[in-house]
Structure formats: structure tokens, C-alpha cells
Image: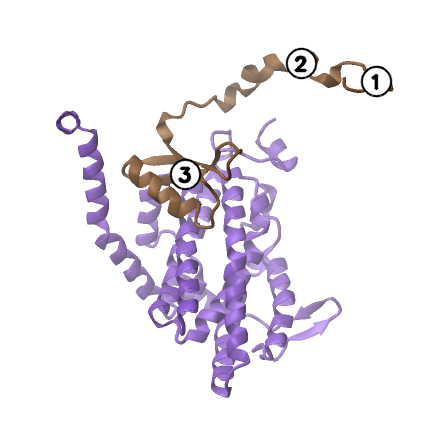
Chain colours: A brown, B purple
Amino acid sequence: MLWEVFVRSKRGLSHTHVGSLHAADAHLALRNARDLYTRRQEGVSLWVVPAEEIVASSPEEKDAFFDPAGDKVYRHPTFYDVPEGLTHL
Amino acid sequence: MDFQEIVDADGRIEPRDDMPEGYRKTLIRQIAQHAHSEIIGMQPEGNWITRAPSLRRKAILVAKVQDEAGHGLYLYSAAETLGVERSELMDMLHTGRQKYSTIFNYPTTCWADVAAIGWLVDGAAIMNQVPLTRCSYGPYARAMTRVCKEESFHQRQGFEAMMVLASGTPAQRTMAQEALDRWWWPALMMFGPSDTDSPNSAQSMAWGIKRFSNDELRQRFVDATVPQAEHLGLTVPDPDLRWEGEHYRFGEIDWDEFFTVMKGNGPCNRQRMAHRVAAHEDGAWVREAAAAYAAKQKSPTVTAAA
């Protein structure tokens, strides 16, 4: 069974995907992840998730899926003109 | 953007993207053979764990061999993102349909060979692998980044062990020199056939899998390593070696030896494969037990009883 592994590198940061591994069950997956991805103190916390449980967006639909955000530049602060000399804006 | 546009713009291809079938197949073969090399590479060094000259050297060697297993696993995972099963890859290794680096078919006859492997073999591996951290296939590039971080410890511990021998008793100096004599040429062969004899290189370059040619990387390795040998006070076993302009010119590689070892007739090919297959078969009961335990944990009757 394939598991995806996520490591929190230090307190204050979120878990980040680091790779995958094979294990028969969750307990072994966690042990294997410890041995495979944190041999040099790369993390303080580990998540393992069955790869088949992850629901992913499809690369073919990428454009249609993410396009709605494309024409909404007004969501960014750089869209707005700020008079010169003013601060805290 | 389509595949070639992404590659040409130095972008990364990710697992479920459209890609040419040839690209997928080339990557599966290359990543799998790289993974096989990592795990077969555990054998020549593992051979010396019980006989390491000190507890310090033993702890270092155990850590290094464990890293090689880890590198194999990162790479098998990367290969699997291309839609191939781990068990298929193991099967192709065990039946000889996929190969591993010829370097691991040479024996480690004394402790100095372990030092020389770290210095030369891992040094050559780094030269090959650093450009792969920018390979067009995302999962392979990311695995290589992790591997390269760890390899630099491998190379340094090897060089340090060589330094200790090279500055030791006359007998230890001789051991160090003989290890260099044994490993120099096989290390140069690790970069693969000469460019004129490497038919798939151009396609791999166009696909962004390969960044530099075999001969370019080999030249870099020679240029980087010869001064290190001089620092150790050892002699590189090549009468034709000389500094010329900006590079070291070196003698002709014995390609007959390279192809002999590649075809399965090196000093340890049969031993390496027999050991790998035996380890796989001897470990079958562990995999079966783990799977049976996992199935039992999932079954409703056990859950109710617990």
C-alpha cells in the first residue's frame, strides 16, 4: 500500500509533502516515514496519508479550473494606486 | 502549455501531466536503474560493517549504507509516480531485465576499498546527480535534491578515511594507493559510454532529463579529483594524465572491460544478484506477516472483539 508523507520541519511551520513510501498499515507507514524522511532531524511531526485517499484536481482541467481567478486582479493590493508619500497603506 | 513548451521553458513536468510515451519509458528505466544501483550499492560496503576499524568508522558506515537504502526508496517512489508498480521494478532487477551501475560489480577486498568508494564512487555519483536536481521531471528532481544533500557526507567521510590511511604507516599508505589503483578506472566508467557511443543522449537532452554529456561530466570529475589525490600524496594510475590548458587530459578507458561488466561478466555480478534475490526471498515472510496483520486489523470481527 502506497502512503504519502508530510513533515513539519519545525514548530510554527505547516506540514509539507516530502514523498511517498510503501507499508502494510498506518503504524508501519509512520515508522518507515521516520526512518526514510527524518534521519537527520528534518522534522518534529509526521503525517502519513493513504495515497488513494487523496482527491486531486486534474491537470487536463487545470485551465478551466483555475481560470476564474485570472481576471480578478483587484484582489491584489498592487491593483490600487496609492498617492506618493503616504505610508501605512 | 504543452509538454515541449514546458520543458523548453525550463519548467517541470509533474506526474499526471501529458507526456510522450518515450519520455515516460526513458524516465522509468533511468530512475529504476538508478534506484537499483543504490540498493545493490549497499552490498560492497555492507561487507565491511562488521570489520570496520573503529566504532566511529562503523557508526559512519552503518549510517551511509542506511542512506543508500533510503536513496533507493526515494527513487522507487519517484518511478512509481509514472504508473509502474514497485513489484514490477524489483522483478525486472531480479530477472536481469533492468541493470544497475557497473561499479557495484567490483569487490571490496580491504578496508581501504571502503574509503576509496566513499571518495571516488560517491564523488562521481555527486557529479552525475547534481545536474539531475534540475531534471525536467519534478519527482525525480526532488528525489535527487534529497540524495545530493546526503551524498556529500558520503564523499567526505570517504576522503577523510583515505587521508587517515595515506598519512599512516607505510603499509597503510600502500593500502590507500592500491585502493586508488583499483577504483580509479571503474569510477571513470560510471559516467557511461563516450558521447560518440551514447545513442540516447541527444533525446534525453531535448527532454531536459540530461543536462551535460557523459564526457563533460567525466572531465569535471577528473579535474576535481586529481588535485585531491595529490593532496593525499597518492598517484593516479594513469601514465597519460597531464594538465593541459584548463583541464587534465587522461588516458583511454578500457571500454571492453566496461561492456564485459555491463553484460554480467564482472568480478561480482552473479554474487550481487544472488544476494539481492536471496534477501528478497528471505524477507517474503515479513512482508506477508505485515500484510496479514494489516488485514486482521481492518476486519470487523477483530475490531468488535477489541
Residue B296, given in percent of the width and then of the height, sits at 17, 33
Residue B185, given in percent of the width and then of the height, sits at 52, 71
Q: Would you call the spot at circle 3 few (<14 residues within 10 Å), some (14-19), or many (20 or more)?
A: many
First of labels 3, 1 by sequence position: 3
Q: Which element type, helix, strand or loop, lies under badge 1?
A: loop
First of labels 2, 1 by sequence position: 2
Q: Decide: is A50 above or below B276.
A: above
| CA distance for labels 2 and 1 | 21 Å
- Tell which of B173 and B183 is nearer to you: B173
The residue singled out by tag 3 in the image is A20
- The structure residue drawn at horizontal position 54% and vertical position 64%, both measured from the top left corner, is B156
- The structure residue drawn at horizontal position 50% and vertical position 61%, both measured from the top left corner, is B154
The residue singled out by tag 1 in the image is A86
* Quadrant location, the C terminus of chain B: top left
The amino acid type, in three-letter code, at marker 2 is Arg
Q: Would you call the spot at circle 1 few (<14 residues within 10 Å), some (14-19), or many (20 or more)?
A: few
| CA distance for labels 3 and 1 | 50 Å
The amino acid type, in three-letter code, at marker 3 is Ser
Q: Which chain hosts label 3?
A: A
- Tell which of B255 and B302 is nearer to you: B302
Q: Decide: is A13 above or below B124.
A: above
Decide if residue B70 is on the left or right side of residue B126. left
Q: Which chain hosts label 2?
A: A
Q: Which element type, helix, strand or loop, lies under badge 2?
A: helix
The residue singled out by tag 2 in the image is A75
The amino acid type, in three-letter code, at marker 1 is Leu
- Mark 3 vs mark 1, foreground winner is 1
Q: Are marks 2 and 1 on the same chain?
A: yes
Would residue B254 be visible to someone looking at this image? Answer: no
Q: Would you call the spot at circle 2 few (<14 residues within 10 Å), some (14-19), or many (20 or more)?
A: few
Residue B116, given in percent of the width and then of the height, sits at 49, 70
First of labels 3, 2 by sequence position: 3
